[in-house]
Image (cartoon, rainbow, N blue to C red):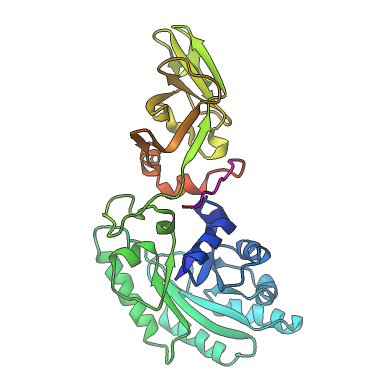
Amino acid sequence: MFAVVKANGYGHGLTQAAQACLEAGATGLCVAILDEGLTLRAAGITVPILVLGITEPRWASLAAEQQISLTVGSLDWFRQAAELLTTAQAPILNVHLALDTGMGRIGFQEPAALKETVDYLNAHTEIFTFEGIFTHFATADEQDPTYFKQQCQRWQAFMAVLSTRPRYVHVSNTATSLWHDACNGNMIRYGVGIYGLNPSGGTIESPYQLEPALRLTTQLAFVKHLAAGMSVSYGATYTAKQDEWVGTLPIGYADGYPRRMQGFYVLVDGQKCEIIGRVCMDQMMVRLPHEYPVDTAVTLIGQDGEQTITMQAVADYAGTIHYEIATTLGMRVPRVYEDQ
């Protein structure tokens, strides 16, 4: 099981998420770009690391030196990298071949091209190790299995041209591992489920209880009495109909909380408090039931008393998916880690 910790550990923290996953039994890690893998190596992490995106051939030597496996989707890439690796007298580079079975993103599109590339790798074992092969499903988190089955068929057509399989054969992301038995290889790339989030967003019930790992909290930075008829925030899109108490929070869309959340709510003292006016870059305002002191805790995602705001609820209101909410949380938002 390789834990996917790309995008700063889905917003939770790259090295912290990686270390927690390894302590829990993960045997390797997946990242999106080489820089993420280098950060993990610099943190002293020595397990196998796979870069899921395409890396420019000019960085092949660096990846080989750091024992970071790269994803490749064309024979031309190997020809460019081979010259550079030979010139640099670099160690052997571990590679995984990406197959485009229907995601339409990266990878070989035809079995014949795959076979030609595998033949090339077999002829250049002093430069490359054919360590893995994989594909990615586009609809594994949806109710209708039709397209998923089509991708499985394409996968089987690709695999039929291989005389021997590499060490790692992997098709299962979180959704595939939860809801599908077809096409299983010997490795799972477990991603969003690590962080306690349902990859379908709730469209399909998870067979296992997923507990969210993240809470997003802040505090009241300023509290004022707003007179009836006064407006709040850019565009004056909110005007008080009566006298009310308003709290200002030191968080905004630059921190990853979407600008379009006006009319949603946060939790203060276990009570729902409406977001009034447009969310600003660095601040936002909420209507309070009564005066609260500055520094009173505010929950944007998580539980407060008997009330809970899920990341999915925030995503639904913002018209997006919880992946986006999690991964766009800004770096100036402090991450505080608690042992469970």
Location of residue 43 in the rendering, given as x and y in whole percent from the top left corner: 66, 63
Q: Is residue 94 rendered magenta in the image?
A: no
As drawn, the residue found furthest toward the right would be: 88
Q: Determine the residue positioned at 32% across, 64% down.
A: 178
Location of residue 188 in the rendering, given as x and y in whole percent from the top left corner: 41, 71
Residue 331's quadrant in the figure? top right
Name the residue nearer the viewer: 338 or 86.
338
Q: Determine the residue positioned at 53% across, 44% down.
A: 329
Location of residue 333 in the rendering, given as x and y in whole percent from the top left corner: 58, 41
Q: Determine the residue positioned at 52% across, 40% down.
A: 256
Location of residue 280 in the rendering, given as x and y in whole percent from the top left corner: 54, 28
Count of labels shown?
A: 0
Above or below: residue 333 compared with residue 201: above
Q: Determine the residue positioned at 50% across, 53% down.
A: 10
- Is 179 left, or right, of 16 in this rendering? left
Above or below: residue 296 compared with residue 95: above
- Main SS, magenta region, reads loop
- Is 340 left, or right, of 85 in this rendering? left
Q: Quarter of the image for the N terminus: give it.
A: bottom left
Specify start and end residues of the magenta stretch as a single range: 333-339
Name the residue nearer the viewer: 114 or 156.
156
As drawn, the residue found furthest toward the front would be: 340
Above or below: residue 300 compared with residue 221: below
Name the residue nearer the viewer: 284 or 137.
284
Name the residue nearer the viewer: 100 or 134.
134
Above or below: residue 333 compared with residue 185: above
